[in-house]
Image: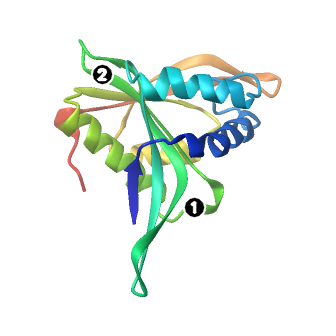
């Protein structure tokens, strides 16, 4: 079972490692490797203050018949970023660790994030920017109901060449939780 949870200080080392690994794939806006001090500043500025970013862990909960206390493991992170509280829109982001992909975890986590954004936060619009070479993300966002809204041509420089960014969006009126 997948749940969203709060990011704890104990999660920061794993998040830093994921961010540094993702840096090699070109799917982040981050341009340089980060150290633990950078990750701590991010935690203080983004996670604790929650002004224009809400970041949450993706938690895999294994319930055992032999144990009343379920085993919980952090397998990813999701977020609503660049929140504009006046216009009621935000940008969605998601990362699920490689050993937990292609089994519905990402779909469930993104669905929970959208439900939270629309129903709990009262957002009207949630967007995503996906680089052209990130086909798995594109499929995931389309599966949960995002619509392709446009292209930023030659917007991302990666591995010695320019790539397009695809813009996706979903409105609260289009959100129907499956």
x 39%, y 19%: residue: 52
Residue 122 lies left or right of residue 134; in this view the side is left
Count of picture labels: 2
Residue 28 lies left or right of residue 178; in this view the side is right
For the residue labelled by badge 2, is the local secondary structure a helix, a strand or a loop? Answer: strand
**Quarter where residue 115 is shown:** top left
Residue 81 picture location, percent across and down: 43, 25
Residue at image mark 1:
100
Q: Residue lying farthest right?
A: 160
State the colouring used for the structure image: rainbow
x 53%, y 54%: residue: 74
Residue 25 picture location, percent across and down: 72, 38
Q: Residue lying farthest bottom?
A: 66
Residue 175 picture location, percent across and down: 22, 42
Quadrant of the image for the C terminus?
bottom left
**Quarter where residue 82 is shown:** top left
Instruction: Name the one closer to the observer, 106 or 13.
Output: 13
For the residue labelled by badge 1, is the local secondary structure a helix, a strand or a loop? Answer: helix
Residue 167 visible at all: no
Residue 101 visible at all: yes
Tell me if residue 8 comes above or below residue 104 in the rendering: above
Residue 19 lies left or right of residue 43; in this view the side is right
Q: Residues within 10 Å of mark 1 (few under 14, many from 20)?
A: few
Instruction: Name the one closer to the observer, 108 or 57.
Output: 57
Residue at image mark 2:
89
- The answer for how far apart the CA atoms under marks 1 and 2 are is 29 Å
């Amino acid at each position: 079972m997948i749940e969203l949870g709060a990011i704890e200080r104990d999660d920061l080392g794993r998040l830093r490692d994921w961010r540094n690994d993702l840096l090699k794939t070109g799917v982040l806006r981050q341009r340089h490797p980060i150290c633990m001090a950078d990750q701590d500043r991010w935690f203080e500025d983004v996670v604790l203050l929650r002004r224009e970013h809400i970041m949450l862990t993706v938690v895999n909960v294994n319930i055992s018949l032999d144990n009343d206390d379920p085993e919980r493991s952090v397998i990813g992170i999701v977020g609503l970023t660049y929140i504009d509280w006046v216009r009621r829109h935000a940008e969605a982001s998601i990362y699920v660790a490689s050993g937990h992909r292609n089994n519905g975890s990402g779909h469930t986590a993104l669905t929970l994030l959208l439900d939270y954004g629309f129903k709990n936060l009262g957002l009207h619009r949630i967007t995503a920017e996906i680089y052209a070479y990130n086909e798995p993300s594109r499929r995931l966002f389309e599966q949960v109901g995002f619509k392709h809204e446009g292209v930023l041509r030659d917007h991302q420089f990666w591995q010695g060449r320019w790539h397009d960014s695809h813009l996706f969006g979903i409105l609260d009126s289009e959100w129907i939780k499956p």
